[in-house]
Amino acid sequence: MRVVIAGAGSVGRSIARELLSHDHEVVIIDKTPTAMRVAQVPDADWLLADACELGTLENARVAEADVVVGATGDDKANLVFSLLCKTEFGVPRTVARVNNPRNEWMFDQSWGVDVAVSTPRIMTAMVEEAVAVGDLVKIFTFHQSGADILEITVPPESPLVGTRVGAIEWPADTVLAAIVRGPQPIAPSGDDTLEVGDELLLVTGRDVDTDALQTLLVGGQTAR
């Protein structure tokens, strides 16, 4: 897979190293000479240029890329980079970093962004997930579909404790994707039963009533 990354900061370099370790082809673009720390990612192709200019993207052969990543610290640059890659070069998948959560609303398909990654939002979700028991925590939103990944840790008072997964009437457009029990991830089957402390990962559609889902998981009638 060929990946072009705009932004040679710590985020861009980390992404590049990870991709290279999986044998992908990586190009890193940055317009700041001091960001050209080639020795830190020697296996990538480096380009000192402005990623928001068409000539730069042509030189980087963005038209041949499978994925591009806007990883700069500037939300405007990430948006323009994504838009040009999508509209001018037809890149199949664009991923953009959101630095300021107030700008999240712009990071959608109208700006050529397929996947928006907000570091502050992810960190907030991780904090909530670490301390919350019995509360639904939104881990991630798929911007293209609007679907969410939610997490909840089953509390002792949950009526689902001891209930078979196959006997639970989940709301429409809700899928139990995984159960994490201690260090062990479990692909749930209908015969698995839920236990206190299980972490449930659920994928839900954009119109799911999260209040009803919370009630299902923590209180109320659940089983047939």
Image: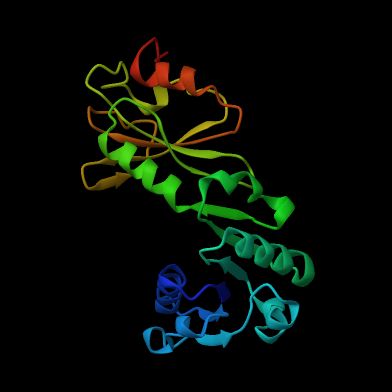
In percent of the image, x 75 and y 72: which residue is there? Answer: 89
As displayed, is residue 221 above or below residue 213? above
As displayed, is residue 161 above or below residue 190? above
Q: Quadrant for the C terminus, please.
A: top left
Question: 94 or 55, which is in the foreground?
Answer: 55
Q: Quadrant for the N terminus, please.
A: bottom right
Location of residue 166 (image quadrant): top left
x then y, percent, for residue 64: 68, 79
Horizontal arrangement in the rendering, residue 80 relative to residue 36 (left or right): right
Residue 187 seen by the camera = no
Please tell me how many numbered marks the rendered image carries: 0
x then y, percent, for residue 143: 61, 46
Location of residue 163 (image quadrant): top left
Q: Residue furthest right?
A: 88
In percent of the image, x 30 and y 15: which residue is there? Answer: 159
Horizontal arrangement in the rendering, residue 187 relative to residue 56 (left or right): left
In percent of the image, x 40 and y 76: which residue is there? Answer: 17
Question: 57 or 25, which is in the foreground?
Answer: 57
As displayed, is residue 66 above or below residue 105? below
In percent of the image, x 69 and y 86: which residue is there? Answer: 59
x then y, percent, for residue 181: 24, 40
Residue 80 seen by the camera = yes
